[in-house]
Amino acid sequence: MKTGRGLLAALAIVLACQWIGAQSLSYSSGQNVSPAFEGWEENPDGTFSMLFGYMNRNWEEEIDVPVGADNTISPGEPDQGQPTHFLPRRNRFVFKVRVPKDFGTKELVWTLATKGKTEKAYATLRLDSKVDDVVKASETGALGAGTSSPEVRANKPPTVKIEGDSKRTARVGQPITVVALVTDDGIPKRRAGGGVIGSQSGAAGASSRGADAAGRGGRGAADPNAPPRPLFSPPSRVTVGKVTGLHLSWFVYRGPGKVTIDPPQVKPWEDTRTGANSPWAPLWTPPPVPEDGKYPAQVTFDEPGTYVLRALADDGALFANQELTVTVTR
């Protein structure tokens, strides 16, 4: 009987290890994109805005889904400002859809079909889904979950304005110059904090691991030489950590072909890998802020079509964006 119990225990450990391994799988390409409802905010006129983002489960592949049956919002017109070009990994608070004062208990649904899978995000005015600027800063990684400070509460999002016309023309292979003018209040101050808190990805994670271990009596508590017990210890809190400091990113929001932007831009998506040009990456530091507040870039299109470029100004906690439509011909 003891032998039988021992075999069962060993089998349970093996299965647990396999489950943990399956949960940690990551992919460069071939996976789908899942839409996400981030919450809602109330507008000064009494209407509401539903906030959406998405999770592209790939680390490298960017996916295009034109507005239509595979990328639609209902009720209402299928096109309500959602992206058609999906950057890798997690992208939060990407766009908003305004709904009327009397929206009540209705649902707004974003349907997205990619890689043979159809997923939906359901937006409602549930009270526990209401967000404000502090919630946004927390969700994107500038704050620890459930924390706040006078500095953060005083923060205002940057402002961004694209110079020139909001609609431009270009030819395939011929670069155009785009310029965004950004102003900010200087809050929050620049500080490190990229990576995944509670993981092996960065300094922020390292400090929280020690605190977590001491609190739960694991490795790093009274006996620093005790071996780790990953299968029997509570999991660490895993949230993104983000470096604060003003920066701007140009990227493709809609468009059918490859686009080259020079200089290479700070990634607007949560790339937590060490060395990535991303505010969520360990060791990343914000680039210097131009004295005139202007962020120019050269943009080259490989295919004809209609493109929407987005200029995203981000102080590490709050953000603002403006869009430029470019019609590209041969």
Image: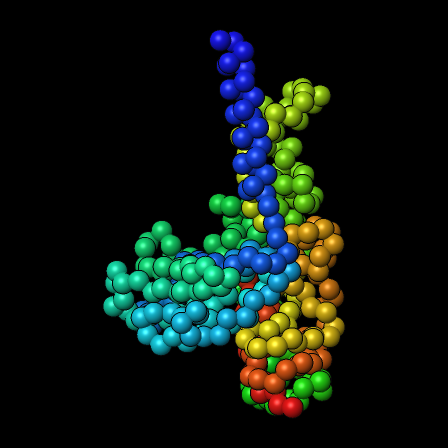
In the displayed structure, 303 sits above or below 93; it is: below
Q: Position of residue 152 (x, y in %)?
A: 54, 55
Residue visible at 40% across and 60% down? 120
Q: Position of residue 163 (x, y in %)?
A: 62, 84
In the displayed structure, 32 sits above or below 10; it is: below
Residue visible at 47% across and 61% down? 116
108 left or right, relative to 279? left
Whether residue 148 is visible, yes or no, is yes
Residue visible at 38% across and 54% down? 129
Total numbered circles: 0
Q: Residue furthest top?
A: 1
Quadrant in which residue 309 is drawn: bottom right
Q: Position of residue 44 (x, y in %)?
A: 36, 70
> Where's the C terminus, which quadrant?
bottom right
In the displayed structure, 300 sits above or below 5; it is: below
244 left or right, relative to 232? right
Q: How is the image coloured?
A: rainbow
Residue visible at 47% across and 54% down? 135
Whether residue 269 is visible, yes or no, is no
Q: Position of residue 316 (x, y in %)?
A: 61, 59
Q: Nearer the viewer, residue 189 or 251?
A: 251
Q: Nearer the viewer, residue 159 or 36?
A: 36
